[in-house]
């Protein structure tokens, strides 16, 4: 018996010695199988959920774009054009049948009273461009008080609707009659005949060290530098160095540009091309290009002067222009509404409804007037609006092609400064105009200085009688100051 | 007698290991699987031949890409209005994340073929993982049969502005004269529509596609 037990024990040890590797192999295989099975299942579940969500979304998408005739001249017959994008749900709506879009415009003479309903019609000349139009009735177009309107657009296949502007009757789009506008004829732009800066107030090389600013370059990526700047009434310059996650503050009275050492304020940013404006107390309003979550619109951050986050709010619309700190708080120009919307006061930021309900076509100035701007073809229309009526207006016509208007703001003496980019096939440059009641009080040209990209409409700031330009070249970013001087 | 490692014990251990593996993967899976987004995409060829397409078709294609991700050298995307892999290391295709890059988006939006000698129209689903043979510089120079250069003052709806390193499609214009550009901008921004001032910039030139319907 004892001999048999010994043999048994020996056999069991051999057996276990063989079983142990098999056990290890089995455990590893089982773990791998469990992980793979779970991953596959989760991936399929996510894809299914996404597919279901995507199918549900296609039918609800109705995207509208519209360029409002913000400023009209006597005798013009404005046409309201709307480009409507919508989809018919199916296997692949992007390669499926076109959706049937419909819409109505609600319009009235002036800025008060009942609206008249006018149906939109598909553009017969270019039916595949998604354009739907209605002519403004002659009696409304002829109103000396201008007109106001909004549109309701529909996907006839799914019933999805969209109102533009989204404020609807409460904050319709407003068009103003320019009346007796001052006509200004610019000559051909003289590229190369550029005014020298009164002073280069800031200069910073590329990099991430003290006093340097970030630069993004490379194949198939844009060359991007600091995306925004602002100038305070006291001459303090703040530069948004988003690639290095900070703002740089150059205090007025610093040594010359080559010796200026900015204060660095660490910021928690996405690093995308953001715009920025700074309030009198140093509070920074930073407009990030995207929100953080699903389908979110751009995000406005309110940040204290020392970099401490205070608050944030999403914009009402998906596309944004500049952020500015106005008389009543921060405002952002938003699209497709093409309206300036208040974003808050110095106490709190606004949500969606507050932005939409107080939207206006122009940028509110310190004196309470609005500056309403429209670039139409190679003509720049600018109007000072008070109590919903044009009090002063200019039609600036250019034989050289006009790109965008970078700045249109009023000075304390009532003159309006306009900075517009003009271009040819080979060249580009800025025209700086100081406009008064008789036409051009001052005029000069500036170079593009746009080696590195910034936020779209943040190349210039006007402080009193001084214009600041935010520029760059392959070696550095810089801020130049120009004194405006009336030539008559 | 020392207890043996019985088949029953092996089976129990295997089940426990299976559950452990599934639990671990469920926990870490989001980080891992999001960088294999392209594994869920369709093949790069052949696409669907189409007889014609309109500028509005280009607009809508870019519209759907807006809000999605950016992937250098990519690619493919879904329609969930979210960048599923934001902030990947830039300028590397190895992250396999969601989205196209700037030239890849234009290639697909303009319904082009990988055959650079052909002007035929080819529809690519947003989930088809294809970049195409062109870079931004290619489009800027009008390289390839379907691509043309466009005079700057003629660049309009569904045309593009191209530099040697970037390209974006004109989706519209606003009151200040700025263009609304649909573009795959970069990891920090993703793909979306923004106001841009490429029109008057010396860095950018007009680019277009032959054969809009």
Image: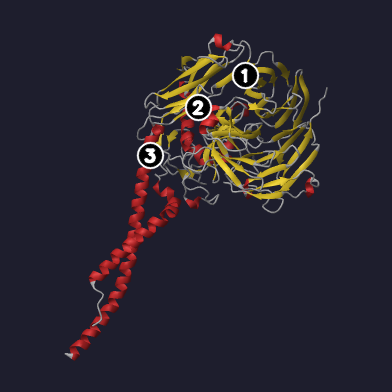
- The Cα atoms of the two marked residues, 2 and 1, are separated by 20 Å
Q: Is B155 left, or right, of A435 in this rendering?
A: left
Point 75% across, 25% down: residue: A434
Among the two numbered marks 2 and 1 on one chain, the one whose residue lies closer to the N terminus: 2
Determine the image quadrant of residue B173.
top right
Tag shown at residue A110: none
Q: Residue furthest left?
A: A1
Q: Are marks 3 and 1 on the same chain?
A: yes
**Label 3: how many Cα within 10 Å (few below 14, some 14–19, many 20+):** few
The picture quadrant where one finds residue A112 is: top right
Tell me if I can see residue B116 in this picture: no
Along the line of sight, which residue is nearer the eye, A419 or A436? A436
Q: Position of residue A97 (x, y in %)?
A: 38, 28
Q: CA distance from mark 3 to mark 1?
A: 44 Å
Mark 2 surroundings within 10 Å by alpha-carbon count, few (fewer than 14), some (14 through 19), many (20 or more) = many
Identify the image quadrant of the C terminus of chain A: top right
Secondary-structure class at tag 1? loop
Quarter of the image with the N terminus of chain A in it? bottom left
In terms of depth relative to the viewer, which is nearer, A132 or B139? A132
Label 2 sits on a secondary structure element that is: loop
Q: What residue is pinned by disc 3?
A: A53
Q: Bin the neighbour count of mark 1 within 10 Å (Cα to Cα): few under 14, some 14-19, many 20 and up.
A: some
Q: Chain of mark 1?
A: A
Which residue matches tag 1?
A388
- Position of A302 compared to B123: left or right? right
Residue A82 is situated, as x and y percent measured from the top left of the image, at 50, 22
């Amino acid at each position: 018996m004892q001999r048999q037990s010994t043999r048994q024990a020996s056999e069991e040890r051999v057996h276990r010695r063989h079983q142990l590797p098999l056990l290890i192999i089995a455990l590893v295989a089982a773990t791998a199988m469990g992980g793979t099975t779970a991953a596959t299942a989760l991936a399929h579940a996510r894809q299914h959920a996404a597919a279901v969500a995507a199918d549900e979304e296609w039918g609800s998408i109705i995207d509208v774009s519209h360029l409002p005739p913000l400023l009209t001249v006597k005798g013009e017959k404005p046409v309201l054009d709307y480009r409507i994008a919508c989809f018919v749900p199916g296997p692949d709506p992007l390669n499926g049948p076109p959706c049937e879009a419909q819409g109505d415009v609600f319009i009235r003479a002036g800025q008060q009273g009942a609206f008249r309903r006018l149906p939109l019609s598909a553009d017969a000349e270019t039916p595949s461009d998604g354009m739907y139009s209605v002519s403004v009735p002659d009696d409304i177009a002829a109103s000396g008080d201008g007109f106001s309107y909004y549109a309701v657009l529909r996907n006839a296949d799914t019933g999805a609707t969209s109102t533009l502007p989204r404020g609807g009757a409460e904050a319709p789009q407003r068009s103003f009659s320019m009346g007796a506008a001052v006509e200004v004829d610019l000559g051909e732009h003289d590229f190369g005949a550029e005014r020298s800066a009164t002073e280069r107030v800031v200069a910073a090389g590329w990099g991430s060290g003290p006093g340097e600013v970030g630069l993004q370059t490379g194949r198939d990526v844009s060359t991007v530098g600091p995306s925004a700047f602002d100038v305070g009434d006291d001459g303090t310059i703040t530069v948004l160095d988003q690639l290095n996650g900070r703002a740089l503050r150059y205090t007025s009275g610093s040594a010359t540009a080559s010796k200026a050492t900015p204060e660095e304020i660490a910021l928690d940013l996405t690093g995308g091309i953001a715009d920025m404006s700074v309030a009198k107390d140093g509070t920074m309003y930073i407009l990030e290009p995207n929100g953080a979550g699903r389908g979110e619109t751009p995000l406005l951050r309110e940040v204290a002067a020392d970099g401490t986050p205070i608050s944030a709010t999403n914009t009402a619309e998906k596309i944004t222009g500049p952020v500015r700190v106005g008389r009543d708080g921060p405002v952002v120009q938003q699209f497709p509404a093409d309206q300036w919307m208040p974003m808050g006061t110095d106490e709190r930021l606004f949500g969606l409804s507050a932005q939409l309900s107080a939207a206006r076509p122009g940028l509110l100035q310190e004196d309470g007037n609005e500056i309403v701007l429209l670039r139409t073809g190679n003509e720049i229309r600018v109007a000072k609006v008070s109590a919903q009526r044009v009090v002063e207006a200019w039609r600036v016509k250019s034989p050289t092609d006009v790109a965008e208007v970078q700045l249109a703001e009023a000075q304390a003496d009532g003159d309006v400064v306009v900075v517009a980019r003009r271009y040819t096939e080979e060249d580009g440059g800025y025209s700086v105009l100081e406009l008064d009641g008789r036409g051009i009080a001052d005029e000069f040209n500036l170079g593009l200085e746009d080696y590195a990209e910034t936020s779209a409409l943040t190349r210039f700031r006007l402080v009193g009688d001084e214009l600041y330009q935010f520029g760059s070249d392959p070696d550095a970013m810089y801020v130049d100051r120009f004194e405006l001087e009336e030539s008559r | 007698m020392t207890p043996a490692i019985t088949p029953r014990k092996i089976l129990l251990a295997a089940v426990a290991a299976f559950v452990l593996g599934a639990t671990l993967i469920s926990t870490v899976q989001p980080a891992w699987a999001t960088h294999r987004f392209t594994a869920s995409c369709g093949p790069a060829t052949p696409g669907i031949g189409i007889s014609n397409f309109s500028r509005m078709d280009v607009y809508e294609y870019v519209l759907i890409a807006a809000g999605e991700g950016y992937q250098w050298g990519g690619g493919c995307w879904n329609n969930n209005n979210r960048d599923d892999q934001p902030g990947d290391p830039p300028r590397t295709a190895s992250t396999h994340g969601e989205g196209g890059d700037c030239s890849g988006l234009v290639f697909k939006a303009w319904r082009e073929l990988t055959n650079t000698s052909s002007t035929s129209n080819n529809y690519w689903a947003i989930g088809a993982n294809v970049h195409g043979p062109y870079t931004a510089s290619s489009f800027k120079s009008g390289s390839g049969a379907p691509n043309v250069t466009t005079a700057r003052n003629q660049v309009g709806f569904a045309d593009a502005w191209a530099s040697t390193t970037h390209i974006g499609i004109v989706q519209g214009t606003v009151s200040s004269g700025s263009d609304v550009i649909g573009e795959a901008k970069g990891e920090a921004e993703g793909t979306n529509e923004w106001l841009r001032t490429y029109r008057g910039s010396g860095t950018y030139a007009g680019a277009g596609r032959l054969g809009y319907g």
